[in-house]
Amino acid sequence: MAKTKKIAVIGFGNIGTGVVRLLYEKGIAGLELVKVVDVDIKTKRPVDLPASYLSTDWRLVVADPNIDIIVELIGGIEPAKSILSEALKQGKDVVTANKKLLAKEGESIFQLVSTLHRRIGFRASFVGGHSLIHELGLAGTAAKKFRRIYAILNGTSNYILSTMSREGQSFEAALKEAQAKGYAESDPSDDIDGKDTENKIRILLALISNSYRSAGHFPVEGIRDITQQDIQYADELGYSVKLVGVIEPKEGVFDVAVHPALVPKMSLLGSLPGAYNGTELEDEYGTVSGLVAPGAGAYPTADAVVKDLLDIAEGRTLPIPNSAAPITLGATEAVSRRYYLRFSVSDEAGVLARITDIFWKYNISIAAVIQKEAVSEEFVPVVITTHLAKEGDLQAAIDKVDKLEVVKARTRIIRLLSADT
């Protein structure tokens, strides 16, 4: 019988409390909670621990030779990075829910794990798709390859966009509702500006490439500028607006981005409601599969932590990127996409002809046009969807269009994603 692993949890917030309850109150065979560390050990928690379990000194706990696994649940970069690094150097395995740390400092953490032949569990950094982490981790060293991954990875943004679509609310009203229901923080910037999705995409990219090297810059765009108009027009065209992370490997080069996108309403991602996360994968043989799961929550996160602890205790392999090979990103301007474009133009003859003349010069072909009644005295909205066009050509064309005197506001650009793009 395998030896029972002694566990220390560092971070006694909502998630830490959930992990402690599972380990201490329910009891899990093979795992024994022995220490809980937090800067505040006086505040009453939903779980009562003997005083001997509590500490404010993570250094003392990490140095304890009787502890086998350190669980880091404090978030942020420091002291989280120091806690994991020191624990690994002390010969311990580690588990973390810290997606920001792995996205920003994963190179040093994963390299240390590989060099010291230790194990790190990070399912909980990716609650809405922790099964995907294992699949991609194994794919990084196996024969299976992926043509594309399209993923909704932030429950807050998906809740806001779903609410705008379902109830006809403005972005601001939907955000307030998300905050009132606990789906959004008082400062929701990381979620609605795409930073949280970026962190998760970086973790997935490391697994797919099997490299712990930090990837360079790729485009990240949030949902602040999505209007009820865009939601309605997309619906008329048969699409939903979602915040999507994109990874497309092509001969050792990765096209990567985070941005709002129009996705078919009847697809897995297009039909994804509320605060759920979802991922659509197409493998090298054209087979498409998907994964849907709750995007957040204290219990799902705590459960993911415990799954990693059990894997370590029972000697199962945990996926990590273990190569130092550089990750090569494709040139954004060379990526071909379809596009949704919303123009705000003067209500006069010849406007569309002037726009299409510019498009012709930049090899942009129009798929559909919707012209709406005026929503103000200053302009009328015109919506165009395109066939495949290079990002660089599209941006150059829109720069020209927006300088026309008949164009009264900056053109809204939303990428259009479907199986044929």
Image (spheres, rainbow, N blue to C red):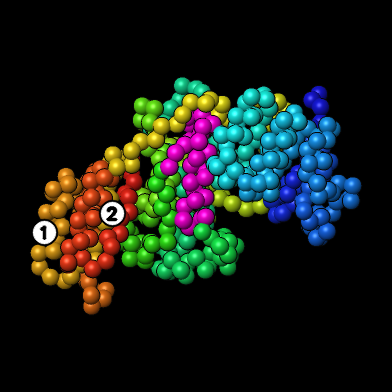
Crowding at label 1, few (<14), some or many (≥20) Cα neighbours within 10 Å?
A: few
Q: Amino acid at mark 1?
A: Ala
Vertical comparison of 307 with 244: above or below? above
Residue annotated with mark 2:
340
Say which of marks 2 and 1 sits in front: 1
Q: Quadrant of residue 151?
A: top left
Quadrant of the frame with the C terminus? top left
Determine if residue 304 is in view.
no
The kind of secondary structure the magenta stretch mainly shows is: helix
Q: Quadrant of residue 32?
A: top right
- Give how far across and how far down residue 159 sits, in percent: 49, 59
Q: Secondary structure at mark 2?
A: strand
Residue annotated with mark 1:
353
- Give how far across and how far down residue 22 sits, in percent: 76, 46
276 left or right of 33?
left
Q: Which residues are magenta?
A: 190-217
Badges 2 and 1: C-beta atoms under 8 Å apart? Answer: no
- Give how far across and how far down residue 1 sits, in percent: 81, 24
Instruction: Based on the picture, tell me whether residue 364 belongs to the magenta stretch.
Output: no
Q: Quadrant of residue 181?
A: bottom right
Q: Amino acid at mark 2?
A: Tyr
Looking at this view, is 171 or 420 the one in front? 171
Marks 2 and 1 sit apart, C-alpha to C-alpha, by 18 Å
